[in-house]
C-alpha cells in the first residue's frame, strides 16, 4: 500500500523539464504548473503567443495530481444556493460555463488525439438521511428550471447502499488527469511553448508595462502578461485574496474490492461528512476512489482517524478490499463558493488570476483558461462576470468572514503570547510539537530515529503561528493554508519562503 502517495502520480509518468537557467523574454509568463496553468499555456501557445510556464516543483505535483478527476457541472447541492443568492441568470451561466468546459475538454481530447481514459459518466448527489430529502428535491427542481442538464430525481443508485433520494446529472465525465496533461504538454512543446520545472517564483517588478519575474533568486522572465495559476495566489497585494478565501484538506483512498465492481457513475453525498465515490482505470481494470472527511487546513484536531473513517465507509459499501493508495490534497474555497477568475485587481493591468476552485478544479481549469485567453485577446467572454476576481460580494458572507478573522487574530496575536510548557526532551520520536527553548518558541519534529528538526513555527506568508499535522508530518497555517515540510520547506502556497531553521547540535 502506498501511503501519502497519489495514485495518479505514482502510476503514470509526466514529461520532465529543466529549470530556468538564463534570462528570457516572452509574451506571457504563467506561474503554476497544475492543470489550469497547463491548459492556459496550451490555448495561448496554440494561438502563437510566446509563453513560458514555470513550476516551483514538478508539473501536476500538488492539487491537480491529487484529484479524484471528476469533470462535472454537478458541484454538490449548489444551484439552489446560486439561484437564491444571485438569481436565475447567474445560476444558468454558471451551469452553462461548466457544461461547456466538459465539452471543451472532450473536444481537445478528440482534436489532439489524447488517450486519457475519458469516459462519459452520470453524476449523483445522494443522501441516506430522510431530513436531507427536501434539500435534494429543491436542488433538482432548480436545475430542471435552468433547463441545461438532463437531470432526474431518483431513489435508487448503483452503489450497494440504501438511499433516501438522489439527483442525477447525465453525461458528465471522468478521465486520467496525468495522461490528459501529458497530451497538452506535448502540444505546448509543438507550439514552441516553454516549460520550466524547479523554477520558483521569488518576486516581480513592473516597469513600462513589462513584468520582470524573478526566479530562484537568479534568473528573470520579462513578459507583457503575468498569470497566476498557483491554486492560492502567491502575491498578496493589491488583490487581498487572503481576506476572501480559506483552504481545506480532503482525504482519498484507492481500493480494489474483493468482489467484482458493479457500479457505474460518480457519487457524492449531500450531508456531512462528505464522501465522494467513483472508479478509475488501473492496469486496465476499475478500482474505486473514495474521498472526503474534509477539514480546514491548520485546524487543531486529531487527523489520524481520517483514513480510518474512509476505510470504514469502504468496507461498509464494498465489503473486503485491498487498500492500494491513500493521500490527501488541499483546495481553496472562496467565501461565496464561486471561483475567482480574471483580473487580479482593479489596479494591476495585464495581471490575471485563477483560484478558489473548491473541489471542482478539473472543470474549472478549462473555464479559467478560456476566460483569461479571451481577456488577453481583448475578447468578451460571456462568463467572465460570473467569476469576476475583483468582486467584493464575497465579503457579505459574514459568518465565514468572521471565522477567518477570529482564526487570524488567534494565530497572529493571541497564540504569540501563549507560552508552551513542553521542552525538547519531552517530544517523542515521530512526534511534532511547539516547545519553549528559553523564551523562544521552536517547532520541533523528531523522526523515528530521534533526529531533531527545528523550525521557527510562524508562517512565512503573514506570520500566523503554525500547527503540527501529525498525519502528514507537516507544519500547517490555520490562517491561509500554507503548509511546510518538517524540514521547513514550503510545499503549499500562499507561502513561497521556507521556514527558518534552528540548529540544536
Image (tube, grey):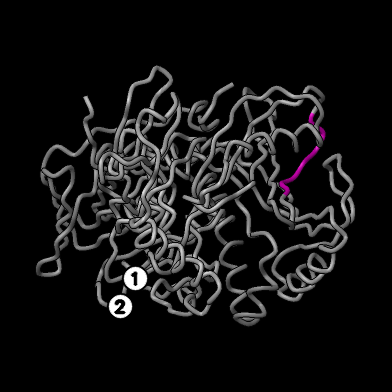
Vertical comparison of 335 with 474: above or below: below
Residue 125 sits in quarter:
bottom right
Q: Which residue is disc 1 drawn over? A: 343
Residue 441, percent from left and from top: 30, 45
Using the image, tell me which numbered label, if any, was put on residue 291: none
336 or 153: which is nearer to us? 336
Q: Are marks 2 and 1 in contact (CB under 8 Å)?
A: yes
Count of all numbered marks drawn on residues in the image:
2
- The quarter of the picture where the C terminus appears is top left
Q: Which residue is disc 2 drawn over? A: 346
- The quarter of the picture where the N terminus appears is top right
Q: Residues within 10 Å of mark 1 (few under 14, many from 20)?
A: many
Q: Residues within 10 Å of mark 2 (few under 14, many from 20)?
A: few
330 or 124: which is nearer to us? 330
Q: For the residue labelled by badge 2, is the local secondary structure a helix, a strand or a loop?
A: loop
Vertical comparison of 226 with 112: above or below: below
Q: Is residue 470 left or right of residue 141?
A: left
Res 136 seen here? yes
Residue 187, percent from left and from top: 38, 42
Most prominent secondary structure in the magenta stretch?
loop
Q: For the residue labelled by badge 1, is the local secondary structure a helix, a strand or a loop?
A: strand
237 or 160: which is nearer to us? 237
Q: Is residue 164 left or right of residue 51?
A: right
Instruction: Residue at 72% x, 64% y: name it.
Output: 149
Res 42 seen here? no
Q: Which residues are magenta?
A: 261-267
Residue 157, percent from left and from top: 85, 48
* Magenta stretch: includes residue 281: no
Amino acid at each position: 500500500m502506498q501511503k501519502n502517495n497519489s495514485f495518479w502520480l505514482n502510476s503514470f509518468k509526466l514529461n520532465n523539464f529543466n529549470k530556468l537557467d538564463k534570462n528570457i523574454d516572452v509574451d506571457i509568463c504563467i506561474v503554476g504548473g497544475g492543470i489550469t496553468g497547463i491548459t492556459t499555456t496550451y490555448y495561448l501557445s496554440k494561438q502563437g503567443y510566446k509563453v513560458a510556464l514555470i513550476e516551483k516543483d514538478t508539473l501536476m505535483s500538488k492539487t491537480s495530481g491529487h484529484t479524484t478527476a471528476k469533470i462535472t457541472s454537478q458541484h454538490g447541492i449548489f444551484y439552489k444556493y446560486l439561484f437564491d443568492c444571485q438569481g436565475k441568470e447567474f445560476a444558468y451561466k454558471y451551469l452553462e460555463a461548466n457544461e461547456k468546459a466538459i465539452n471543451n475538454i472532450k473536444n481537445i481530447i478528440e482534436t489532439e488525439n489524447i488517450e486519457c481514459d475519458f469516459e462519459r459518466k452520470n453524476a449523483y448527489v445522494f443522501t441516506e438521511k430522510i431530513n436531507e430529502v427536501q434539500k435534494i428535491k429543491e436542488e433538482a427542481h432548480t436545475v430542471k428550471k435552468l433547463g441545461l442538464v438532463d437531470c432526474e430525481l431518483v431513489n435508487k443508485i448503483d452503489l450497494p447502499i440504501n438511499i433516501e433520494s438522489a439527483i442525477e446529472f447525465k453525461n458528465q465525465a471522468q478521465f486520467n488527469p496525468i495522461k490528459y496533461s501529458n497530451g497538452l504538454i506535448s502540444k505546448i512543446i509543438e507550439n514552441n511553448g516553454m516549460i520550466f520545472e524547479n523554477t520558483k517564483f521569488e518576486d516581480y517588478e513592473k516597469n513600462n508595462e513589462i513584468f520582470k519575474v524573478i526566479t530562484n533568486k537568479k534568473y528573470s522572465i520579462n513578459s507583457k502578461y503575468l498569470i497566476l495559476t498557483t491554486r492560492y495566489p502567491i502575491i498578496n497585494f493589491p488583490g487581498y485574496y487572503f481576506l476572501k478565501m480559506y483552504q481545506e484538506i480532503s482525504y482519498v483512498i484507492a481500493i480494489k474490492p474483493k468482489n467484482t465492481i458493479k457500479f457505474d457513475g460518480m457519487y457524492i453525498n449531500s450531508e456531512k461528512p462528505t464522501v465522494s465515490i467513483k472508479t478509475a482505470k488501473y492496469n486496465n481494470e476499475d478500482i474505486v476512489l473514495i474521498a472526503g472527511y474534509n477539514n480546514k487546513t491548520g485546524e487543531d484536531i486529531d487527523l489520524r482517524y481520517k483514513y480510518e473513517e474512509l476505510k470504514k465507509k469502504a468496507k461498509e459499501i464494498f465489503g473486503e478490499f485491498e487498500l492500494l493508495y491513500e493521500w490527501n490534497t488541499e483546495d481553496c474555497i472562496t467565501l461565496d463558493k464561486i471561483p475567482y477568475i480574471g483580473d487580479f485587481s482593479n489596479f494591476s493591468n495585464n495581471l490575471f488570476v485563477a483560484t478558489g476552485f473548491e473541489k471542482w478544479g478539473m472543470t474549472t481549469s478549462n473555464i479559467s483558461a478560456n476566460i483569461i485567453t479571451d481577456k488577453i485577446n481583448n475578447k468578451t467572454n460571456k462568463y467572465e462576470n460570473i467569476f469576476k476576481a475583483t468582486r467584493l460580494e464575497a465579503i457579505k458572507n459574514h459568518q465565514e468572514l468572521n471565522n477567518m478573522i477570529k482564526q487570524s487574530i488567534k494565530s497572529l496575536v493571541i497564540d504569540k503570547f501563549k507560552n508552551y510548557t513542553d521542552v525538547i526532551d519531552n517530544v517523542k520520536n515521530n512526534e511534532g510539537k511547539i516547545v519553549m527553548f528559553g523564551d523562544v518558541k521552536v517547532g520541533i519534529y523528531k523522526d523515528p530515529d530521534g533526529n531533531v528538526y527545528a523550525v521557527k513555527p510562524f508562517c512565512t506568508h503573514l506570520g500566523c503561528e503554525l500547527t503540527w499535522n501529525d498525519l502528514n508530518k507537516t507544519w500547517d497555517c490555520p490562517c491561509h493554508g500554507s503548509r511546510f515540510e518538517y524540514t521547513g520547506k514550503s510545499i503549499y502556497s500562499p507561502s513561497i519562503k521556507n521556514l527558518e531553521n534552528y540548529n540544536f547540535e
